[in-house]
């Protein structure tokens, strides 16, 4: 079974995350398959609008944090850290996380995300790069990465999506923003009943698809270039450097790219100290 489904409905490409048994957690194969699906939609001249949706109860639980597969020599990125530092891992994240999300944000066709259930951590990095977001009434959004000792996911959309105060609240508490609040804050365009999510998103995509494709591209670029003139691109690059510092700090403290929970760390240090005496 493929991790990504692709179909075309007249002028609309419909791309579906298809790992529902894992709440659409993103592994490398899924991200690369998703990128290929976006490329396919871009290259198909018949396609005017792209929908990104997800099979199952949840849009995406984020990045799949199970240790990454070893390469042909049996080496994983984690094995490489003692010898070469975090270089390999951070290059991987720059390409697969920040890089792909940035690429998808600038695809030369309009994109619409249809989000239901949980959209957590890396899930935000699939929804935010889309031009429009339609949320089901059960959708909820969170970046809980601060719990792992890192200041947030690799793609810092937070401040741009709903302003400085809410960005800090979401990060400081690792809390959820529900669909109604996301709509009030301007992070999602519309909220619809869960049962109407696909139908409503397709109707909107068809409406957008009646516009001239070149005009749509210019409209999209007008907004994205304005954001970049306001500093979005440079801000995201510098926040990615902070994210990398978070991984480095976690490695220094725990020999792992993310921190253990605070309670576990206190317990471990207590054990270590009592072992020393
Ligand atoms: Zn990371």
Image: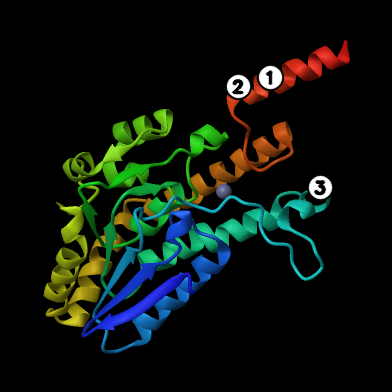
Q: Earlier in the sequence, mark 2 or mark 3?
A: 3
Marks 2 and 1 in Cβ contact (< 8 Å) = yes
Residue underneath mark 2: 263
Residue 29: image location, x then y, percent: 56, 68
Horizontal side of residue 190 vs 24, given as left or right = left
Q: Which numbered disc, 3 or 1, marks the residue closer to the eye?
A: 1
Q: Residue at x 27, y 42 (%)?
A: 162
Which residue is most to the bottom? 45
Structural distance between the alpha carbons of marks 2 and 3: 26 Å
Structural distance between the alpha carbons of marks 2 and 1: 6 Å
Q: What is the crowding at mark 2: few (fewer than 14 residues within 10 Å), some, or many (at least 20)?
A: few
Q: Which numbered disc, 2 or 3, marks the residue closer to the eye?
A: 2
Q: How many marks?
A: 3
Residue underneath mark 3: 82
Residue underneath mark 1: 267
> Label for residue 222?
none
Residue 211: image location, x then y, percent: 13, 79
Marks 2 and 3 in Cβ contact (< 8 Å) = no
Q: Secondary structure at mark 1?
A: helix
Which residue is most to the top? 277
Q: Residue at x 71, y 31 (%)?
A: 253
The quadrant where residue 96 appears: bottom right
Q: Residue at x 19, y 65 (%)?
A: 201
Name the foreground residue: 177 vs 245.
177
Position above or below: 206 against 44: above
Residue 249: image location, x then y, percent: 66, 35
The quadrant where residue 266 appears: top right
Structural distance between the alpha carbons of marks 3 and 1: 25 Å
């Amino acid at each position: 079974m493929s991790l990504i489904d692709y179909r075309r409905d007249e002028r609309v490409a419909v791309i579906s995350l298809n790992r529902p048994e894992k709440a659409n957690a993103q592994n490398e194969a899924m991200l690369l398959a998703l990128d290929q699906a976006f490329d396919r939609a871009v290259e198909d001249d018949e396609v005017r609008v792209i929908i990104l949706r997800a099979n199952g109860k949840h849009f995406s639980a984020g990045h799949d944090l199970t240790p990454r597969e070893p390469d042909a020599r049996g080496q994983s990125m984690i094995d490489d850290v003692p010898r070469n530092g975090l270089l390999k891992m951070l290059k991987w994240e720059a390409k697969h996380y920040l890089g792909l999300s940035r690429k998808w944000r600038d695809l030369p066709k309009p994109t619409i995300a249809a989000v239901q259930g949980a959209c957590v951590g890396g899930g935000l990095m699939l929804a935010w790069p889309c031009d429009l977001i339609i949320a089901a009434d059960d959708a909820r959004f969170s970046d809980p990465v601060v719990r792992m000792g890192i200041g947030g996911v690799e793609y810092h959309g937070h401040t741009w999506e709903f302003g400085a105060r809410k960005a800090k609240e979401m990060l400081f508490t690792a809390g959820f923003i529900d669909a109604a609040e996301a709509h009030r804050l301007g992070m999602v365009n519309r909220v619809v009943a869960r049962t109407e999510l696909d139908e409503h998103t397709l109707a909107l995509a068809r409406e957008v698809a009646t516009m001239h494709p070149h005009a749509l591209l210019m409209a999209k670029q007008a907004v994205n270039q304005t954001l970049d003139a306001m500093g979005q691109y440079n801000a995201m690059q510098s926040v990615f450097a902070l994210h990398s510092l978070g991984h480095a700090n976690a490695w220094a403290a725990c020999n792992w790219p993310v921190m253990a929970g605070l309670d576990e760390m206190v317990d471990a240090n207590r054990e270590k100290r009592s072992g020393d005496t």
